[in-house]
Amino acid sequence: MTDNLGRLGIRSDQNLVVIALVSVIALALVQVKIVIIPGLIARTLGAALRPVIIWLRRHNVAVMLATWITLLGGAVVFGGIITLIVLAVRNQWNKLAVAASQVLDELQALLVEGPIPIDQERSTLYAMSPSTF
C-alpha cells in the first residue's frame, strides 16, 4: 500500500465513507424534522391552552373533562374563524374574479408590450393553457 495506486484506493474508500455518512446524517435530519415540528406545535398549543385548563380545574372540573372541553372549544373557535373567512371570500367572489381578470389582462399586455417580445397569439395561448389543463 505504499505505491500511488494504494494511496489512491485508500483515499477513494475514505471519500465513499464520508459521502455515506453525510447521506445517513441528511436522512436522519429529515426524520427528525418529521418528529420535531409536530412536537413543537403540540408543546406550543399545550402551553397556550394550559391557562384555560387550570381555570377549569379551579372550578372543580376533572382534568380529563377540562382537557376535552378546552380541545373541543378550541376546535369550535378555529372552525368558526375558518367559516367566517370562507363566508367573507364567498361574499366578495365576484369582485375577486373581476380583479383577477384585470390582473391577467395587465399581465398579458405586459407580455406583449414588455421588454421580452411575445406576440399576441402566443400570449393568448399562455393565457388559455391553465384553463385547458
Image (cartoon, rainbow, N blue to C red):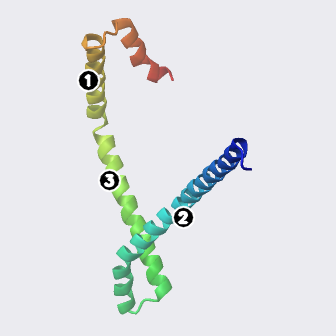
Q: Pinpoint residue 1: horizontal percent, then vertical percent.
A: 74, 50
Judge whether residue 90 can be spotted in this image.
yes
Q: Residues within 10 Å of mark 3 (few under 14, many from 20)?
A: few
Which residue is disc 3 drawn over? Answer: 84
Which residue is disc 2 drawn over? Answer: 35
Q: Tell me how many marks there are.
A: 3
* Secondary structure state at the residue bearing disc 1: helix
Inspect the image, locate mark 2, and give the three-letter code of the amino acid beneath it.
Answer: Val
Inspect the image, locate mark 1, and give the three-letter code of the amino acid beneath it.
Answer: Gln
Contact, mark 1 vs mark 3 (Cβ under 8 Å): no
* Secondary structure state at the residue bearing disc 2: helix
**Picture residue at 59% right of the left edge, 59% below the top:** 28
**Picture residue at 36% right of the left edge, 59% below the top:** 80
Q: Residues within 10 Å of mark 1 (few under 14, many from 20)?
A: few
* Secondary structure state at the residue bearing disc 3: helix
Q: Is residue 23 left or right of residue 78?
A: right
Q: Pinpoint residue 84: horizontal percent, then vertical percent.
A: 32, 53
Inspect the image, locate mark 3, and give the three-letter code of the amino acid beneath it.
Answer: Leu
Residue 102, numbered label: 1
Q: Earlier in the sequence, mark 2 or mark 3?
A: 2
